[in-house]
Amino acid sequence: MRYGKAGCIRRCITVIFSAFFACLCVLPAMAEQPAAQTLQGLITDVGDGYFIMEDQSLGTVRIVLDDVITVYDGVAVKGKLTLGLYVFVQYNGQLTPGTPPQVTAQKVGCYVVNGTVGDILQNGYLVTGDSVLGDVLVHMGQAMPSVYTGMTIAVYYDGVMALSMPPQITAAYIVVPMLDGIASAMTDQGFTLTDASGVAYPVAVNAATRMLTLLADGAHVRAYFLAQPQIGGSIHALEVAALDDNGAPAEVLQY
C-alpha cells in the first residue's frame, strides 16, 4: 500500500502522539516507585528468617531475609548472622509500618577489618595484622570511641575501600577493649569497676592513664584498655572517662 505525502505525515504524527501518551501513562507509575535505601547499624536480635537491627536514623527495624531475594556480601553469611555485628542492609525503599517497622532485605553486607592499632596519624590511624588485608589506613568518623597504639580493634566500614598502599577505609563503627560500669574503692593505684552484670574488675591507673573525670564512689565511668579485661585479674587503664545517665560520654574534663 502506498501513502501520499500528507498521509505519511498524518501517520507519523499519530505514532508520535501515541508514544507520547504512552510515556505519560508510564511516568507516574515510575515516579511512584520509591528509591532504594540503605540501613546501617548493630544487630540486636536474630530469629528464623529475620533479624532486628538498630539503624542509626530509623532506630529499631525488623529485617526480613528472603530465600530468593536476599543476597549476602562481605563476611555476612546466610544463617550465620549474630548479635553485635554491624551490618548494611539495602532494601527497595518500602518500609512496612509496625512496631518495629519492617523491610525485606535485598542485600545484607558486613565489612570488617580486625587487627592492632599501629601509628596514630593526623587523618586517622593504621590497623595492622588483618588476616586478609594486612595493614589498613582507617579514617575516623565522628563520635567514635578513643583509640590508642597497641590496642586490639575491629573496624566496620561500608565496603568501600581506596586501593592505595596501604588500602584506606572510613570507619562506620569500631569495637575496642573498654568497660562501662560503676566506680568504687578508689586508691592512688586504681579502683574497682562493676559492670551492668555485677562483675567487678580491678582497674589499675598510673601517670600515663588519661583521666577525663574525677573519680568518685558511685560514678558511672568508661575505661579503655589494650585488650579486653578478663575476670580475676587487674588490668591497666589507658583512659577513664565519665558517662552520663544514658550511658553516653559526658562532658570531657582534662586532669
Image (spheres, rainbow, N blue to C red):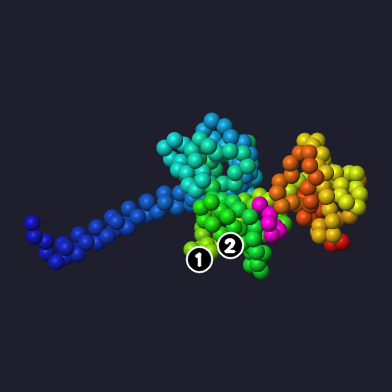
- Residue at (58, 49) in percent of width and height: 40
Residue 182: percent from left, percent from top: 84, 43
- Residue at (51, 46) in percent of width and height: 75
Query: For this rendering, which residue is in front, 18 or 235?
Result: 235
Is 252 a magenta residue? no
Residue 218: percent from left, percent from top: 89, 44
Mark seen at residue 137: 2
Mark seen at residue 123: none
Mark seen at residue 164: 1
| Mark 2: amino acid | Leu
> Mark 1 Cα within 10 Å, few/some/many (few <14, many 20+)?
few
Q: Please indicate, yes or no, whether residue 87 appears anywhere in the rendered image.
A: yes
Residue 196: percent from left, percent from top: 78, 38
* Quadrant that contains the N terminus: bottom left
Query: For this rendering, which residue is in front, 182 or 172?
Result: 182
State which quadrant residue 135 falls in: bottom right
| Mark 1: amino acid | Ser
Span shown in magenta: 147-152
Horizontal side of 202 relative to 15 (left or right) equals: right
Between marks 1 and 2, how big is the CA–CA gap?
9 Å
- Residue at (51, 66) in percent of width and height: 165
> Mark 2 Cα within 10 Å, few/some/many (few <14, many 20+)?
many
